[in-house]
Image: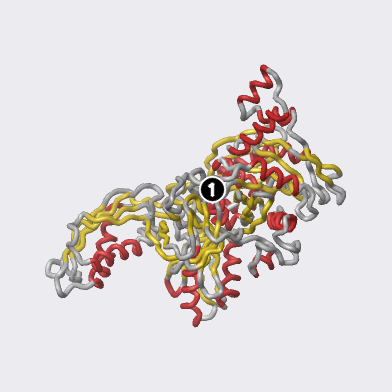
Amino acid sequence: MRTLNIGILAHVDAGKTSLTERLLFDHGAVDRLGSVDAGDTRTDDGGIERRRGITIRSAVAAFTVGDTRVNLIDTPGHSDFVAEVERALEVLDGAVLLLSAVEGVQARTRVLMRALRRLRLPTIVFVNKIDRAGARTDGLLGDVRRLLTPHVAPLTEVADAGTPRARVTRRPPDGRTAEALAEVDTEVLAALVDGPEPTGEDVARALAARTADGSFHPLYHGSALGGQGVAELVEGLLGLIPAATPGTSGGTSGGTEPRGTVFAVRPGPAGERTAYLRLYGGEVHPRRRLTFLRRESDGRTTEVSGRVTRLDVVGGDATLTAGNIAALTVPGGLRVGDRLGGPTDRAPQFAPPTLQTLVRARHPEQAAPLRSALLALADQDPLLHARPAASGATALLLYGEVQMEVLAATLAEDFGIEAEFTPGRVRFLERPAGTGEAAEEMPWLDRTRYFATIGLRVEPGPRGSGGAFGYETELGALPRAFHQAVEETVHDMLRTGLTGAAVTDYRVTLIRSGFSSPLSTAADFRGLTPLVLRRALARAGTVLHEPYQAFEAEVPADTLAAVTALLASLGADFTGTTGGDPAWIVTGELPARRVREAELRLPGLTRGEAVWSSRPCEDRPLKPGNSGPGTGVGGHSGE
């Protein structure tokens, strides 16, 4: 049995979960068609998901067609849950990008297509809701070619679009398909120019090859609720998207040692964690001992080992084989992003969250349970950063306001805790500007009163490395507990830098050490380290950075001057302006703290006709004259 792992991606409310339900029902995986409105779908099984009618966590379901098992990964559509989508993209063999025939190409759709094209992931476009009033087909195809990708061709046609009588018929690859393929396939281009013209079989073969390498995108029409066009979509999935084989997915090699990625984690009723693992090579069977690599928030890599106590392979097999997905439990728990056997080539490139907030319990007696609950939730998802803050609060990093609302509901329903969130502020970061050293000796040489000698050097680390700690002292010069006390204190103290922002991309080295036996204790080293570290950091200096968003704004031609003036006043750096009458597309980068203001003011300047999308990109040094992390900066950080 071959396996296809297919992700369903879309802007929120385009019909992802409805399409998943239809595929499962049509192929006998479920005996009743679930409804998002009724809250009884297979994949949105959480209480919050069902009440809000949105997907929050990636979910996996499977159906079988002939000798092919299709694992469907239903991903969130809202930009606040980009971390879930990020991990799903990494484990897919192909994707279905859903559009609504009524709403058309939306901001989130464009962001998703950019990610799919960057990964060269085989992608089929499915235009949903053709039976809804206001549905478009021909005009929407033009929008797809202009806003998503020019390399697309429809393989179905629609009659009576926009009415309950809408019907879909197949459109075999023909001369129009060949002309579209000629832009990405040299053999088809040569045949069209020099002859003989490509046959239908030639075009079909080129279509399959260019879909498989991610350079071309077949387009299908249909209705997830009504079932029209779904059979044609399945035919396209089976015929155009190749199943991965061991050694070809994720950059891994075939062999006996298992290699895979944890892309989703669900909490169980007894507090255990169920992890979803996509396997690229090798095999995993119950009771096998596995070692996962985990990248910590400070950049360090740690190992997590344990024996598989539960293994549920999607599709019902007893053993997890390469190319398949399983839900498994390992004592101690796994996190999203844990890797079995090492990294893969298809590394996620979404930026970390930039919106920070403080969370407090509404009832003081729940302060400790609240902190424990937040740390437990953050431990399941490495992109939900949580750490203790002053006055019993917990500091959180999130992607946006909707994620904050869902988190509040989760705390209330799953933990029985009522929590209050402060308005979100954009997170600033500090990076060392240079190198600084400092040292303190034991108390008979200074006034610290700590029975410890510590010397530290602070210097910049590679971009994106987080934080690293190293030694230049002689191995064994300090007892292990003292070494650990210094290292843990360094990482903990650098959560707050010279301006109050967290320090990142640093390297701290222990260059001098000493102790007095039996007087010295680990507490001496924990107490002295902050004094030495602060002095070394001050001598190195830091540069304050703020997060930026890469934006794209499509605006009417007569409003271009007003829009560019607004964006320039908000601190935008422009990277391009293309188009003409009737619309221009403006691209650039904007400080994340000004994105919400741009979103609010654009409709008034463009008669409500602007189409805006933005996504996190690299941060930049704060420009002179701008406020730092002490400034309250509210608003949404995302699309």
Count of residue discs: 1
Q: Is residue 57 above or below residue 416?
A: above
- Which element is circle 1 on? strand
> What's the residue type where badge 1 is placed?
Gln
Left or right, residue 229 beside residue 408: right
Residue at (56, 42) in percent of width and height: 568
Residue at (60, 71) in percent of width and height: 409
Q: Is residue 103 above or below residue 155?
A: below
Whether residue 395 is visible: no
Residue 83: horizontal and vertical position, in percent? Answer: 54, 56
Residue 69: horizontal and vertical position, in percent? Answer: 63, 52
Observer-nearest residue: 44 or 400? 44
Spot the residue most to the top: 194
Residue placed under numbered mark 1 in the picture = 549
Residue 363: horizontal and vertical position, in percent? Answer: 53, 80
Left or right, residue 474 beside residue 113: left
Spot the residue most to the left: 444
Quadrant assignment, res 444: bottom left
Spot the residue most to the bottom: 365
Residue 277: horizontal and vertical position, in percent? Answer: 52, 58
Residue at (28, 60) in percent of width and height: 533
Left or right, residue 157 beside residue 66: right
The type of colouring in the image is secondary structure
Left or right, residue 242 beside residue 440: right
